[in-house]
Amino acid sequence: MPVPRRSSGDLGGNPDNSHMFSIGRRFTPLFLAVGLVLAQHGPTAIRPASAQVPAADHDRPRVGVATAPVSIRYTFDSGPRLPITDLDGGHPLRPLGENGGKLRLVPQGTGLAVAYPDRCTRAREADCPRAILQGLRDDSLNPGTRPLVYGASVLMTRSDLADGANVFQKGYSVGGGSQFKLQVDHRLGHPSCVVVGRLGGIFRAEPSLNVADGRWHVLACVRSADRLTLRVDGEEKAWVRLPPRLMIANAEPLRVGGKGPARGNDQFAGLIDNVFLRIE
């Protein structure tokens, strides 16, 4: 059944059915709940003991990779508490943003989902509100060459679409650092999975399928030894062949809803829930 489109009247203005993550000063997240304001300075870097550091390249950051299976999931059902953690209480996420960008927790089924800022229509993109969730550096979330499954549930409408809307990612596609990413690209509402190895080359699995239809969809990216597959609501919709031993390892944190809070961040608009990552 289609989910009614949110509005400021039924989700944004009533403190009984929504909670607000409000971004104040540049890159400084503030959390507002029942009159309480908590401030958190920028994230710091960590390297857990479970991360192994491969041989370093002269021109790339020294980063580790997972040495054991990893499984994390964010349901956002714990309510207005910072930091947001996964189901095991780890891998914290905090809101970051610019220009008054706000994230809200809104009802979804028996739990909660994250509502991102509405698609901006201002003349200057630099003036648009932007907001994302961002973790800490954690090298144990780098799959290296291991099998990987990651994704999220999303609800988008046509008005949420833009040239880029990043759902979930670690790393960047340029700069030699490597990446895995889930996005809904262009104004056709096509979901796609992207991976980039440390030796370069962008590999994307994208079907001719519109998921910006006002319904919830489960998007899952599956990286195996030789292919990257996109599943939509449990069904395989697209795949692309990968080179053997493609290495994904970067010094970036997990990000949900954009590649950062700054201008040109491929800001997501719509709702996100049940973000997950599994390294096998």
Image: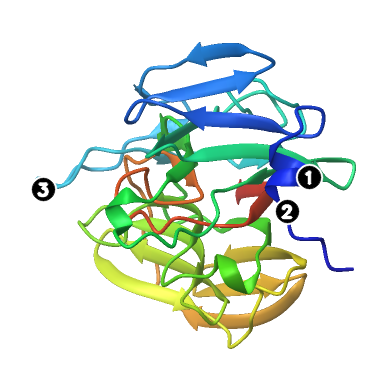
Q: How many marks?
A: 3
Please indicate whether residue 143 sits to the left or right of residue 271 in the image: left
The answer to whether residue 86 is visible is no
Task: Tell me the residue that label 2 is attached to.
Answer: 6
Q: Amino acid at mark 1?
A: Asp
The quarter holding residue 51 reads top left
Residue 208's x, y, as percent? 58, 88
Kindly report the distance in space between the C-alpha atoms of the residues bearing marks 2 and 1: 7 Å
Indicate the colouring scheme: rainbow
Who's the residue at 37% across and 39% down the image?
99
Kindly report the distance in space between the C-alpha atoms of the residues bearing marks 1 and 3: 51 Å
The quarter holding residue 269 reads bottom right
* Disc nearest the viewer among 3 and 2: 2
Residue 108's x, y, as percent? 81, 47
Residue 244's x, y, as percent? 40, 71
Task: Tell me the residue that label 3 is attached to.
Answer: 59
Q: Which element type, helix, strand or loop, lies under badge 1?
A: helix
Ranked by sequence position, the earlier of labels 3 and 2 is: 2
